[in-house]
Amino acid sequence: MNQISASASRLKAVAALGQQIWLDNLSRELLASGELARWIADDGIQGVTSNPSIFYNAIRNDCAYQAALPALRAAHPDPEARFEALVLPDVQAACDLFAPLYADSDGHAGFVSFEVSPRLAHDAAGTVLEARRLWAAIGRPNAMIKIPATEAGIAAVEEVIYAGINVNVTLIFSATQLTAVRAAHRRGLARRLEAMLSVQRIASVASVFISRVDAAVDALLPAGADALRGKAAIAAARLAYHEFQNDSGFAIFAAFGATPQWLLWASTGVKNPAMRDVTYVEELIGAATVNTVPDATLAAFRDHGEARLSLENDVDGARAVLTQLGRHGIALDTIGNDLLRAGLTQFEQAHANLLALLA
């Protein structure tokens, strides 16, 4: 049965279909006010993601952070250390809030993501060291270290998985990136098996960005191609999910208790005002996936979202969309590379702004 009654929480209805909804936000206010705890209880939120932009906005606007800054400035001369001293306790508190879910799900839900410094995006060895350090500093089994899907980042993913650290691979914009990310994840697991190490409870998600792809594609569509507007990212996501479902290559790892690298849909707030505001939730629901949503999208879906299995819909139609885009000269891999560079620049700038705020 694909339809869930709207009498229950609309967000919990998504969970009943096998998809986890994570909140794309974290702040001390969310924790201290009890709001995050209420969303976990009432709506079945199963995880949290964060990034430099999120923390910049939180620190700039949250009085609790502002009150803590004078003492931190005296204790930590380095702004990066000051930032971690300010927010890592909140990451730990969020992990603790999700700890019962993590335990009840046998390590399949209840994760809190924290990102390595954007300055390391092209430094594989530095990323590995940073991931190890942050993993130890947070000290929670349901933490996830976010690593961008650059060439260096993907190389680091293999090493970090081999080290037994949970990884959220972020800024994935193309099928080529996704294929490389999956391969790195499996190489890390394979090396653990070769070393006679356990592959159990090593979680990973591949964060595929949605709305940014559609915005970029739509800007390139010629007159007369209106039927393709807002369709590219969902089509690509459905094909990625189809491949995930039909991939037998993970079976050897599953036999040793490994958890597959789930697809996570990111950037799911609608940017085109002509689109339904919950499009990137409603059209991307499938078992063994995650959707990380900003507060506004969460509120919109709570109000009027429809929970229904949709990722398996019309795979042939999804292929046709990508074929038509190709006929218009639109290459998603090229767009993906451009968006990756832009995403890195955005996070680098947010990180620089963040450190300036803490100076």
Image: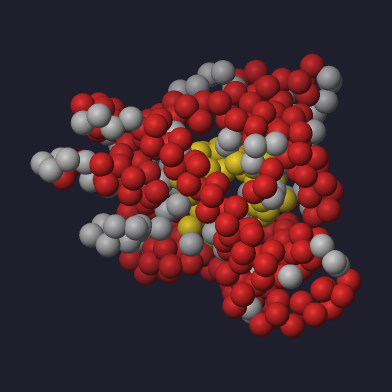
Residue at point 84% right, 20% down?
Answer: 196
Image colouring: secondary structure
The relative height of residue 239 versus residue 166 in the rendered view (above or below) is above
From the top left corner, tell me how far across and down residue 308 is, in percent. 35, 49
Residue at point 30% right, 42% down?
Answer: 217
Direction from residue 225 to residue 56 in the image, left or right: right
Viewer-side residue, 231 vs 129: 129
The relative height of residue 187 versus residue 28 in the rendered view (above or below) is above
Residue at point 84% right, 78% down?
Answer: 71
The number of numbered badges drawn on the structure is 0
Viewer-side residue, 75 vs 42: 75
Q: Is residue 161 at least partly visible in the picture?
A: no
From the top left corner, tell me how far across and down residue 36 is, in percent. 61, 69
The relative height of residue 307 versus residue 36 in the rendered view (above or below) is above
* Quadrant assignment for the C terminus: bottom right
Q: Is residue 325 at least partly visible in the picture?
A: yes
Using the rendered view, name the quadrant where residue 351 is placed: bottom right
The relative height of residue 105 versus residue 37 in the rendered view (above or below) is above
Using the rendered view, name the quadrant where residue 354 is placed: bottom right
Viewer-side residue, 77 vs 71: 77
Direction from residue 153 to residue 11 in the image, left or right: left
From the top left corner, tell me how far across and down residue 280 is, in percent. 37, 51
Using the rendered view, name the quadrant where residue 238 is placed: top left
